[in-house]
Image: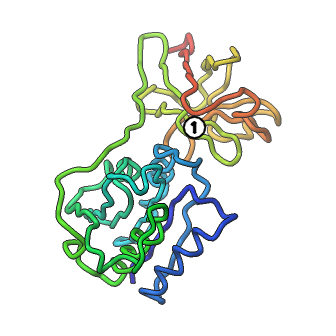
């Protein structure tokens, strides 16, 4: 049995997510459906792509991952389904699937153009329900990808901005802010040669202070800032018991410069 996951910017106050699940269950009433998140900032394709990247590989093989962050809904942007060596992915061809797919061996990409596998009436504003949820339901029943529409060679891609390294510092930026206000940067341990316990100086947009790089949040006192190599493999700026994004007025794209310690 294939699991279906949902990643969207729909929130939970409206009927959107529940209706998508209804469509899937109407096609396959036995399928497990897992919510990854529905709190992606509205229209933020890269944030949706990052949420999918951080989570998709923890699911069983052949899981169908549906990601709908779709500011171009109703336009000429393509809708696609993709089979990799391990999973299936369904969503708009706008980059929201691309960070996860960069980690996978892509076998087939097909455009979703066969109305036989859509809802009977297709809205111009809710392809999450009428196209993507419906296709996910059929994929969970092992319908071959080729039935949904023609093959295509590649997809639209978004990327995580590259850090910039010099002899004295590593420059990066904030790429995601989580529910706790932790600001996740594009700095990896391998990129920046950081070591747990090393002391560096992070230059933030509105602050200049020395922030310890620790293994976990409570290595510093409550209310103190800390930089932690988080579960996603990226350096995140946090405050023990607080909200780093709010305290330091951080947002997506805010610059971060890590000055290496004099010991390096």
> Which residue extends farthest bottom?
29
Relative to 43, does residue 36 appear above or below in the rendering?
Answer: below
Task: Return the x and y of residue 23 as percentages of the image width and height.
Answer: 48, 80
Task: Return the x and y of residue 37 as percentages of the image width and height.
Answer: 57, 59
Q: Which residue does the numbered mark 1 point to in the structure image?
A: 184
Task: Return the x and y of residue 74 as percentages of the image width and height.
Answer: 41, 57
The count of marks equals 1
Residue 5 relative to residue 40: left or right: left
Task: Return the x and y of residue 88 as percentages of the image width and height.
Answer: 33, 67
Identify the residue at horizontal 48%, vertical 10% (top origin).
Answer: 168
For the residue labelled by badge 1, is the local secondary structure a helix, a strand or a loop?
strand
Relative to 168, does residue 241 appear above or below in the rendering?
Answer: below
Identify the residue at horizontal 45%, vertical 26% (top origin).
Answer: 193
Task: Give the color scheme: rainbow, by chain, secondary structure or one colour.
Answer: rainbow
97 or 127, which is in the foreground? 127
Identify the residue at horizontal 20%, vertical 62% (top origin).
Answer: 108
Q: Quadrant of residue 14?
A: bottom right
Which quarter of the figure is the N terminus placed in?
bottom left
Residue 196 relative to residue 129: left or right: right
150 or 192, which is in the foreground? 150
151 or 211, which is in the foreground? 151
Mark 1 surroundings within 10 Å by alpha-carbon count, few (fewer than 14), some (14 through 19), many (20 or more): many
> Which residue extends farthest right?
222
């Amino acid at each position: 049995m294939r699991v279906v996951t949902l990643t969207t910017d729909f929130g939970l106050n409206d009927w959107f997510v529940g209706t998508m699940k209804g469509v899937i269950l109407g096609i396959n009433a036995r399928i497990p459906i897992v919510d990854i998140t529905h709190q992606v900032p509205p229209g933020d394709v890269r944030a949706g792509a990052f949420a999918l990247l951080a989570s998709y590989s923890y699911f069983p093989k052949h899981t169908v991952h549906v990601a709908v962050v779709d500011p171009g809904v109703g336009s000429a942007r393509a809708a696609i389904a993709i089979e990799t060596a391990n999973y299936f992915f369904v969503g708009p061809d706008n980059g929201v699937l691309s960070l996860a797919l960069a980690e996978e061996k892509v076998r087939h990409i097909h455009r979703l153009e066969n109305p036989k596998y859509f809802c009977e009436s297709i809205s111009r504003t809710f392809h999450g329900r009428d196209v993507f949820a419906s296709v996910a339901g059929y994929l969970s029943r092992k319908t071959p990808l080729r039935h949904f529409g023609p093959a295509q060679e590649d997809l639209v891609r978004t990327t995580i901005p590259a850090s910039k390294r010099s002899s004295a510092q590593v420059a990066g930026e904030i790429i995601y802010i989580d529910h706790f206000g932790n600001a996740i940067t594009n700095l990896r341990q391998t990129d920046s040669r950081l070591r747990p316990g090393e002391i560096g100086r992070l230059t933030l947009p509105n602050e200049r202070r020395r922030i310890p790089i620790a293994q976990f949040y409570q290595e510093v006192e409550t209310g103190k800032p800390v930089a932690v190599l988080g579960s996603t493999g990226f350096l995140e700026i946090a405050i023990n018991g607080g909200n780093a994004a709010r305290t330091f007025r951080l947002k997506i794209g805010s610059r971060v410069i890590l000055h290496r310690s004099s010991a390096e």
